[in-house]
C-alpha cells in the first residue's frame, strides 16, 4: 500500500510537471528566431508574450470572456512593437522602411497586415512573419495575427527599353573568358531565384554562341507574338529568350550589327512583370559588353571564373569594366574549383604472401587440421581485404586540380565578400547538355545548395543596391594637416603612411600565407595620395606618390578607424590617470 501510495504521488507530480512544461512550451516558439532582434528587444518581446498569456488566463477565468476592447491608440502600439524588427540588409526597422501596410484589427481582436518586402525572394521572409506574429500576439488586446507577404512593385528606369519597363532588377552574369561555366551559373541561378518565389527571366546575350537553347528545353518552342512584340518562351515559371530560339543558323555579322540586333531583341521582347532578368553576357570586355551595361542600366553583376591565375586576371578586368559603368560586382563564382572523390586507404597488400604466412603459422600447431587451416586463412584474408577496401569509404576529399583559387585575395583586395566554389561534377555538365537545369533534377545535392546560397546573396545584395539609403564612406586628402579625411556613416582621419602600409595587394602581401611582403619602414611619413576614387560599391582605389596603386575594401577602412578610435581612448585614459596621479 505504501509503495502504491508513493507511486501515485509520483505520477501526480509528473503530470503536474508535464502540464506546466506544456504551457511553457506552447509559448516557447514565440521567443525563438532571434535574428533581426537585439537582446534587449528579445527580452521586450518575451515580456509582452508573458503578459499576453497572463491576460489570456485572466479572461478565461472571467466567466468565459475571451475578447478585449482595442484601445484608441492600438495602431500606434502595434507599430511601436514592430519597430524593433530590423532588416539586416537595409539596417533599418520594417516600420520606417514602409514594409508594414494595410494594418487592421477586427472586433474579435485579430490583427491583419501586409508585409511588403523589397523582393518576393527575400531569404528571411518567414523569419519576418514569425517575428511580427510573436510581437502582435504579445499585446494584451490582440487575439491573433494574420501576416500577408507582398513585394514592392517593379519600377524600371525611364530610359529602359520598351519590353523591359516592368523589370525590377537586371543581374549580369559575366566572365572575361569563355568556357568557365558562365551560362551554367546563369541558368541555375535563375531557377534558384524562381524557386524562392521570384518572377525570373533569362536573356542569352551571346549571339555568336548561344547556349540557352541547349541548356534549357522549353515547354513550347513555337515563337508567339503579343501585338508587335515577341513573347518569351517558358520553362516552368522562367521566361527565356535567345538568338538561338529564333535562328538556328550561325550569326555571321560584325560588332555594330550584333549590338543593333541585341537592342532589337531587348525592345521587342515582351517580358512582362519580372523581379529579376538574368543577363547571360557574352565573354569579354569589348564594345558589346559596354553597350549592354549602359543600355540596360544593369543593377549588379556576378563574375564567373576558375581557380587559375589567368582567370583571376580576367576577374580583375571584369570588375574594372563594370566599375567604369557604375555596376557593382556582388559575387564571384569559382567554377570547377575542385574534384571530389571518395577517400581510399593508400595501402598495398600482397594477399598471396599474407595467405602463405597465415597458413605457415596455423600449420605449426598440431591441433588444427589442414582443411580447417585453409578455411580459416581464407576467411582471414577476405576480412583484411574488405577492411582495406572500406577504409575511408563514404568520406570525400577535395582534389584541387587547378590550384587553390583566389577567394581570399578577392575579399581582401576588392572587397567582394561573397565568393562561391562549385566543384567539377559530371552531372552538372550532363544536365547542361540534356536541356534540364541541374538544380531541377538534383535539388537535394550539395551543389544545388550552393546555387541557392548564391541566389540568396543576389536577392539581398540587389535589395541593398536598390533600396539602401546608407551612403558609402568618402575619402579625401587634407594637404594642410597631411591626413586622409573619412566622411559618411564612418568618420575620422587616417595617416597616409599608415594607410599605405596596410595595402593588401599581391605586391604587398603573399597570397597563400598572408605574410606581409612590404617593409613598413620603407614607407616614408611624407607619402601622400595623388588620387582617391571609389571602385564599385565595396572598395576605394588610391594612387600613391611612390607610384603604387592600392585597393582598400570599405570594411578595412572601417576597421582601421575603429582600431584608431580604441587606441585614442586608451591614450586619453592613460593621460587622465597621469593627471590624477600628479594632482594627488
Image: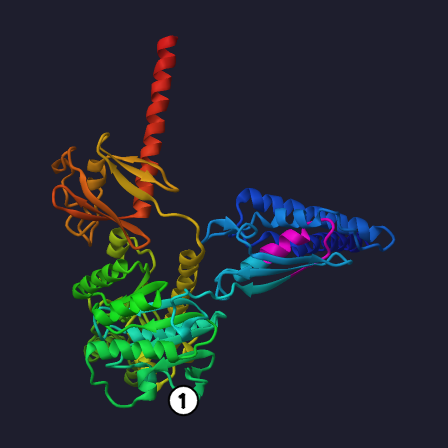
Q: Of residues 549 and 442, which is closer to you in this image?
A: 549
Q: Residue furthest right?
A: 63
Q: Quadrant of residue 423?
A: bottom left
- Inspect this view and state whether residue 24 appears: yes
Residue at screen point 35% across, 65% down: 297
Residue 81: percent from left, percent from top: 62, 48
Residue at screen point 27% across, 40% down: 476
How crowded pointer 1 is (Cα within 10 Å; few <14, some 14-19, many 20+) is rated as: few
Magenta residue check for 382: no
Q: Of residues 122 and 368, which is closer to you in this image?
A: 122
- Indicate the quadrant containing the N terminus: top left, top right, bottom left or bottom right: bottom right
Residue labelled with disc 1: 223
Magenta segment boundaries in residue numbering: 130-146
> Quick check: 228 above or below 192?
below
User: Seen in the image, is 388 located left or right of residue 25?
Assistant: left
> Quick check: 268 above or below 397?
below
User: Seen in the image, is 373 located left or right of residue 158?
Assistant: left
Mark 1 residue element: loop
Amino acid at each position: 500500500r505504501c509503495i502504491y501510495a508513493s507511486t501515485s504521488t509520483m505520477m501526480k507530480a509528473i503530470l503536474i510537471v508535464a502540464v506546466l512544461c506544456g504551457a511553457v512550451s506552447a509559448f516557447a516558439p514565440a521567443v525563438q528566431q532571434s535574428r533581426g532582434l537585439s537582446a534587449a528587444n528579445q527580452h521586450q518581446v518575451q515580456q509582452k508574450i508573458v503578459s499576453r498569456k497572463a491576460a489570456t488566463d485572466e479572461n478565461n477565468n472571467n466567466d468565459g470572456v475571451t475578447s478585449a476592447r482595442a484601445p484608441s491608440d492600438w495602431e500606434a502600439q502595434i507599430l511601436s512593437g514592430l519597430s524593433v524588427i530590423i532588416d539586416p540588409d537595409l539596417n533599418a526597422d520594417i516600420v520606417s522602411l514602409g514594409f508594414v501596410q494595410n494594418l487592421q484589427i477586427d472586433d474579435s481582436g485579430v490583427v491583419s497586415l501586409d508585409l511588403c518586402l523589397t523582393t518576393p525572394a527575400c531569404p528571411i521572409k518567414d523569419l519576418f512573419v514569425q517575428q511580427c506574429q510573436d510581437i502582435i500576439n504579445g499585446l494584451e488586446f490582440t487575439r491573433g495575427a494574420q501576416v500577408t507577404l507582398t513585394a514592392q512593385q517593379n519600377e524600371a528606369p525611364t530610359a529602359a527599353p520598351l519590353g523591359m519597363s516592368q523589370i525590377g532588377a537586371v543581374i549580369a552574369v559575366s566572365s572575361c573568358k569563355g568556357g568557365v561555366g558562365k551560362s551554367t551559373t546563369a541558368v541555375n541561378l535563375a531557377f534558384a531565384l524562381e524557386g524562392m518565389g521570384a518572377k525570373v527571366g533569362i536573356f542569352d546575350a551571346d549571339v555568336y554562341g548561344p547556349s540557352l537553347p541547349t541548356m534549357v528545353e522549353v515547354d513550347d518552342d513555337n515563337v508567339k507574338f503579343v501585338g508587335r512584340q515577341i513573347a518569351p518562351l517558358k520553362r516552368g515559371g522562367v521566361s527565356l529568350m535567345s538568338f538561338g530560339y529564333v535562328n538556328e543558323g550561325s550569326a555571321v555579322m560584325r560588332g555594330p550589327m550584333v549590338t543593333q540586333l541585341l537592342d532589337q531583341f531587348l525592345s521587342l521582347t515582351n517580358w512582362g512583370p519580372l523581379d529579376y532578368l538574368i543577363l547571360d553576357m557574352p565573354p569579354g570586355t569589348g564594345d558589346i559588353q559596354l553597350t549592354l551595361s549602359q543600355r540596360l542600366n544593369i543593377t549588379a553583376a556576378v563574375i564567373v571564373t576558375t581557380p587559375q591565375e589567368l582567370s583571376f586576371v580576367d576577374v580583375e578586368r571584369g570588375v574594372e569594366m563594370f566599375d567604369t559603368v557604375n555596376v557593382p560586382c556582388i559575387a564571384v563564382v569559382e567554377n570547377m574549383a575542385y574534384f571530389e572523390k571518395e577517400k581510399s586507404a593508400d595501402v598495398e597488400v600482397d594477399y598471396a604472401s599474407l595467405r602463405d604466412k597465415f597458413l605457415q603459422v596455423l600449420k605449426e600447431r598440431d591441433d588444427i587440421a589442414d582443411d580447417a587451416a585453409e578455411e580459416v586463412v581464407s576467411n582471414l584474408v577476405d576480412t583484411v581485404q574488405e577492411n582495406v577496401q572500406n577504409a575511408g569509404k563514404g568520406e570525400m576529399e577535395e582534389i584541387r586540380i587547378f590550384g587553390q583559387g583566389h577567394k581570399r585575395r578577392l575579399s581582401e583586395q576588392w572587397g567582394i565578400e561573397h565568393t562561391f566554389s562549385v566543384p567539377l561534377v559530371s552531372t552538372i555538365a550532363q544536365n547542361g547538355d540534356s536541356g534540364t537545369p541541374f538544380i531541377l533534377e538534383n535539388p537535394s545535392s550539395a551543389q544545388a545548395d550552393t546555387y541557392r546560397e548564391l541566389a540568396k546573396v543576389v536577392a539581398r545584395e540587389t535589395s541593398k543596391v536598390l533600396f539602401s539609403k546608407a551612403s558609402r564612406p568618402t575619402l579625401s586628402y587634407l594637404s594642410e594637416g597631411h591626413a586622409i579625411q573619412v566622411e559618411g556613416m564612418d568618420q575620422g582621419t587616417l595617416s597616409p603612411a599608415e594607410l599605405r602600409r596596410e595595402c593588401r595587394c599581391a605586391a604587398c602581401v603573399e597570397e597563400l600565407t598572408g605574410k606581409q611582403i612590404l617593409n613598413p619602414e620603407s614607407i616614408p611619413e611624407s607619402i601622400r595620395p595623388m588620387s582617391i576614387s571609389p571602385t564599385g560599391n565595396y572598395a576605394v582605389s588610391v594612387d600613391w606618390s611612390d607610384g603604387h596603386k592600392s585597393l582598400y575594401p570599405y570594411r578595412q577602412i572601417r576597421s582601421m578607424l575603429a582600431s584608431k578610435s580604441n587606441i585614442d581612448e586608451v591614450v586619453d585614459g592613460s593621460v587622465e590617470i597621469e593627471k590624477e596621479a600628479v594632482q594627488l
